[in-house]
Image (cartoon, helix red, strand yellow):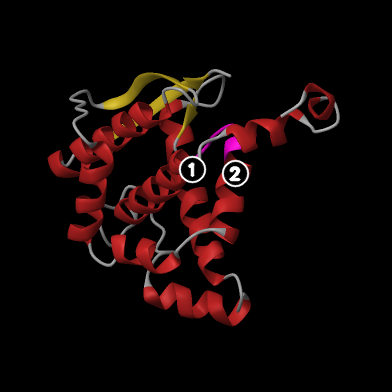
Amino acid sequence: MSTQFKSIIPLPIIKRINMEKKIIHNLTLLRLVVGYLGEKNQYCWWSSSFLTENSKKILEYTFPRTASIAQYEGVSASAAKIHDQRIGVGKSFHLFRLPEYIEKSIVHYYQNELDEESFVLAIRSKEEALDALTILAGTASISEIGPVNIGVFNKDKGASSINKIAASYLTAFNGDKQIFPYFMVSE
């Protein structure tokens, strides 16, 4: 992008353009999978049930074209509340409260580029969600419990950060304990 356009285009848009689509895809999937697993019908970290078929039918009545986005936003808000209570709000971020430019990138991706069917398959059951989480974790491993600082998240370390975040939740769900990964963000 030429420097003459950088002065015209707001900084958050430049950051969003530079954020790799694979990172945004994986963050979106990770948020959906962890949101699903944390709901009351799975591991009950938060009391919502936005990602059930019944909830979708109710939301389709009110939001016929955007019910899946309403589900995604609802479970994200429920999870964010619990994470904020455990981690705190300040200079750190977590999966459900990201910097604004990343949040906007995720919303844009979810609204415009998401293959909803493949995401729905990942949360069809607890086992399939855990399988998706295992894939997202890769070879990363986290053994601590409670709030866990996983380091710095930026576009260069995005993939390894996502692996660590996923590994944290995988350890938690498989070990019946609660882990709340958080991180700092650098440009």
Question: In the rendering, at what x and y percent does residue 60 appear?
Answer: 55, 78
Q: Is 137 drawn above or below residue 45 in the view shown? A: above
SS for dot 2: helix
**Residue 60 falls inside the magenta stretch:** no
* Position of the N terminus by quadrant: top right
Q: Is residue 75 left or right of residue 161?
A: right
Choose top left, top right, bottom left or bottom right for residue 99: top right
Q: Residue at x 37, y 31 (%)?
A: 159
Picture residue at 42% right of the left edge, 29% below the top: 158
Q: Nearer the viewer, residue 13 or 48?
A: 13
SS assignment at label 1: helix
Left or right placement of residue 7 versus residue 35 in this view: right
Q: Which residue is mark 1?
A: 24
Q: Cα distance, mark 2 to mark 1?
A: 7 Å
Q: Which residues are magenta?
A: 96-102
- On the image, the x and y values in percent for residue 81 come to 49, 42
Front residue of 33/80: it is: 33
- Could you classify mark 2 by the number of other residues whose Cα lies within 10 Å: few (under 14), some (14-19), or many (20 or more)? many
Figure check: 18 above or below 39: above
Q: Which mark is residue 105?
A: 2
Q: Amino acid at mark 2?
A: Ser
The residue sitting at 38% across, 61% down in the picture is 119
Horizontal side, residue 48 vs residue 139: left or right: right
**Which circle marks residue 159 in the picture?**
none
Q: Is residue 46 visible?
A: no
Number of callouts:
2
- Where residue 15 appears, x then y in whole percent? 64, 31
* Residue that appears at 52% across and 49% down: 77
Cβ atoms at labels 2 and 1 below 8 Å apart: yes
Q: Amino acid at mark 1?
A: Ile
Please state the horizontal and vertical placement of residue 2, each as a whole percent of the image. Answer: 76, 26
Mark 2 or 1 closer to N-term?
A: 1
